[in-house]
Amino acid sequence: MSPEQSPLAIVRGTLIDGTGNPPVKDSVVLVKDGLIIAVGERGEVEIQEGAEIIEASGMTVLPGLIDAHTHFLWMGLRMMRTIDLSDTRSIEETVEKVRRKLEETKKGEWMLGRGWDDSKWEERRFVNKWDLDPFSPDNPVVLTRICGHMVTLNSRALEIAGITRETPNPIGGQIDKGDDGEPTGVLRDARQLINPFIPLATEGQVIEGIRRACDHALSLGCTGIHDAGLRGSEIKAYQDALEQGVLKIRVTIMWRVELSDSMEALGFQTGFGNEMIRLGPAKLFIDGSLGARTAALFDPYEDDPSTKGLLMMPAEKLNEKVKRIHRLGSQVAVHAIGDYGIELAINAVEEALRDSPRKDHRHRIEHCEILSSSQIERIKQLSIVASVQPNFVCEWSGPDGLYEARLGKRRLRQNNPYRALLDEGVRIPFGSDCIPLHPLYGIHSAVNHPIRNSRISLEEAVKGYTLDAAYASFEEDLKGSVESGKLADIVILERDLTEVQAQEIKDIPVYMTIIGGKILYSRS
């Protein structure tokens, strides 16, 4: 048994408890043996003798922040294995950053980069093999767009993968080719063509990546994550990290739908696990991303009328997969960004429920970015969880932003409609998709939504990253709010969120992160 912990009292902070209720000034939160045992205003809660006092005057006390859609393990690996291109502002700058890194790289070694975003570049076009070939004749180069749905390969990487003018498009993906039929190096939702050739990370690198990712998350007040689309080996890596004392935050596993046979054979369902690692939904895709122009739309892209995006599988196959997961008693999470992709995801859940009625299924649509009012109503009627990423709106909304370029002004109003979803009574857990992992940036983005009619309150935004995120993994009775009897996962911010300007939210540092009553991060 774990040794008994001394009581911990967090006093005089402004408490936003995650339930959506108004903030409580001059609060007291009492913690003992990993649980919250009392919450109230000062004078209402008796502080036990010998309790360690944490003075939070002028600060904010929040539930531990839960990122409901990340790629956490891969974020940790990227910290070690890839060049970060997210800060580049032109193709020239991007190429120069890669070129300089190649000067330090042995001949023949793979060069991996991540985070380039053409919508932030002067040129507004995708990087291609001709940008990379002049300085990389001997090293395969793979640069992943910020959305993860597009990669650019140089000619050496294309050669290794055997991609030529004769290579057909894979199901649900596209190989971009020039007028002469030659591949440009751009693969849209076709990363599977190059993945088998990229050297795998070692077990040691994976564990070290999890350690780095946990340290980063704790510094941002993130006490739990839902890691999206994991293979069997990656699930095991989390278990290994826990056994080795490396895993510090709570993990919900969003497992790849390809593991369905194994899950069924073992009798595993959503909810299997413990307070640190728990199986969540099966993850599958129906479309791609707006950045890659592979999100499936009803109408053509504003900046490329030749396409309406791509489907990763036929609607019939999606229905079949969702129905199977549903019958197994598990939860499903369908990646759907475009309005047409979302329509197919809603239809699939509706058909599964018609086939096998179940009240508390909590099936999820991941991203759920472009919605009509009728779709929002159907999502509510079917009790679907809309798992959204509010940081996207600050990244890509506004005049001349990615959303306006891809969708045009009319459809822009349908983009990330958080106010309409909440008004309809839909649960909207917040995640980041690691673009970037930063819960306060997400809260900031939802409160300061560029579309004024889609803005939500501070308390509602905090709930998205706390109680609604816990609800999305069937754990709202365990965590997600600062209430008596729940796990003592608590974050303290250095300033009072109710006293700052809305535009300042993203810049407020985390003072302390507590998980299970233990202080795992302290800025001091």
Image (cartoon, helix red, strand yellow):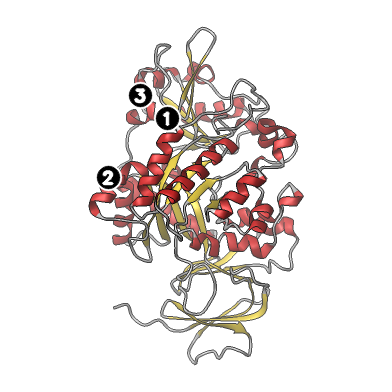
Local secondary structure at mark 2 = helix
Q: Is residue 398 left or right of residue 105?
A: right
Nearer to us in this view, 48 or 367: 367
Which label lies toward us, 2 or 1? 2
Taking 506 as reference, is 312 above or below it?
A: above
Which residue, given by chain and number where applicable, does mark 1 sit on? 191
User: What residue type is disc 2 on?
Assistant: Asp
Taking 365 as reference, is 66 above or below it?
A: below
Q: What is the quadrant of the C terminus in the image?
A: bottom right
Nearer to us in this view, 352 or 298: 352
Q: Is residue 497 left or right of residue 432?
A: right
Local secondary structure at mark 1 = helix
User: Mark 3–mark 1 contact, CB under 8 Å?
Assistant: no
What residue is shown at x 74% (from left), y 47% (from top)?
A: 451
Measuring from the top left, give residue 122's x and y in whole percent: 68, 27
Which residue, given by chain and number where applicable, does mark 2 sit on? 261
Measuring from the top left, give residue 466's x and y in whole percent: 54, 63
User: What residue type is disc 3 on?
Assistant: Gly
Q: What is the quadrant of the N terminus in the image?
A: bottom left
Measuring from the top left, give residue 289's x and y in whole percent: 55, 35
Local secondary structure at mark 3 = loop
Q: Marks 3 and 1, Cα distance to the nearest angstrom?
A: 20 Å
Q: Marks 2 and 1, Cα distance to the nearest angstrom?
A: 24 Å
What residue is shown at x 74% (from left), y 64% (from top)?
A: 500
Which residue, given by chain and number where applicable, does mark 3 sit on? 108
Nearer to us in this view, 136 or 466: 466
User: What residue type is disc 1 on?
Assistant: Arg
